[in-house]
Amino acid sequence: MARLRKFFGGPGGDQIRPGAIAAVAAVAFALWALSGLYLVQPNEQAVVTTFGAYSRSAGPGLNYALPAPIERVEKVPVTSLNRIDIGGADGADVPEESLMLTGDENIVDLDFSVTWRVADAARYIFTIRDPEESVKAVAESAMREVVGRRDLESILTRGRGEVQAQAAELMQQTLDSWGAGVSVVEVQIRNANPPAEVVDAFREVANAGQDAESAVNEANTYRNRVINEAKGDAARITQAAEAYREQAVREATGEASRFDQIYAEYRSAPAVTRERLYIETMQRVLQNSNKVIVDSDGASAPIILPPDVFRPRTGTPAVTATPAETGSAAPGARNNQ
């Protein structure tokens, strides 16, 4: 105490030195000025306001802002993912949120979740008062609009992915028009069912649709098989016809060429050519038939040939007809091939 009195006061301790006051003021000012230092984490974005009005944004790292009450710093997580469940969660259904009217005037009980994050910290702070409630309201409105344009069957079966994508796109457009600074990451449908009162009827309709689809698939399979078989038969017939045409053309071409050659020989030697044609024709006619040569020299009675001579050839040796066999006196009658 004595030292403090000596530091602040004069010899008697009843007067305060001006230098002491200045030193205390300097220390206080230094502490106040240093209070403006702040650290922003990698997953955060800082928003600096000057007397309550937006001034600037700061990224991760060590930053400085004028101490309060001149400037204030608010840190917002911008990489953290936020999730909102609409229609109920953990088995607790909320009918006023989950029941929606479809485009074909049916009702669907639909629960879904929205994953979102902060894209612009300044807009996130100054544009929307209650971010979670705002995102939830936009999500429910967008989903009802998308569901209202589609039929119940597509929502429950193959069109679920399209519904999710369209709802996320519509949500993002609405939030961007507000300048909310929120980015929609994903919209995921957790459950989509018809109302409990019509579940049985809907299952019967679904089963009937599956049966009809199976029948159509079987019919298509039979049609494809029949068509393929018909195409195969047509291709085989076409190939056979083309082969026959080629054969006929080649034979006709060969015959025409042979005729031209014969005609050229005939013009050069008509008599010889006629004789040769006659001999060749007789050769073709007689080479596969039975032939009987009769020597009529000295014959005085009719010659009677046995019936076997006129039978078709069977590859057996030739039979020679003698006068004793034929009942004729002609010794020169014989059967040759």
Image (spheres, grey):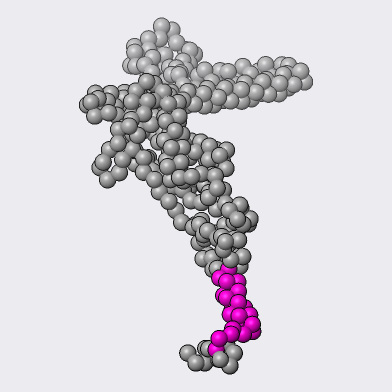
| Residue at left offset 71%, top offset 16% | 271
Quick one: 162 or 275, which is closer to the camera?
162
295 vs 56, nearest the viewer: 56
Name the magenta segment's main secondary structure.
helix
Image point (55%, 48%), residue name: 126
Left or right side of 97 for 40: right
- Does the stretch in magenta take in 20? yes
Asked whether 210 or 46 is in front, the reply is 46
- 62 versus 20 height, above or below: above
Which quarter of the picture shows residue 250?
top right
Whole-percent x, y for residue 196 in the image: 24, 29
Residue 180 image-quadrant placement? top right
Quadrant (top left, top right, bottom left, bottom right) of the C terminus: top left
Residue 134: x and y in percent read 46, 41
* Magenta highlight range: 13-37
**Residue 132: image x %, image y %?**
43, 45
38 or 211, nearer to the observer: 38
Image spot of residue 93 (x, y percent): 27, 38
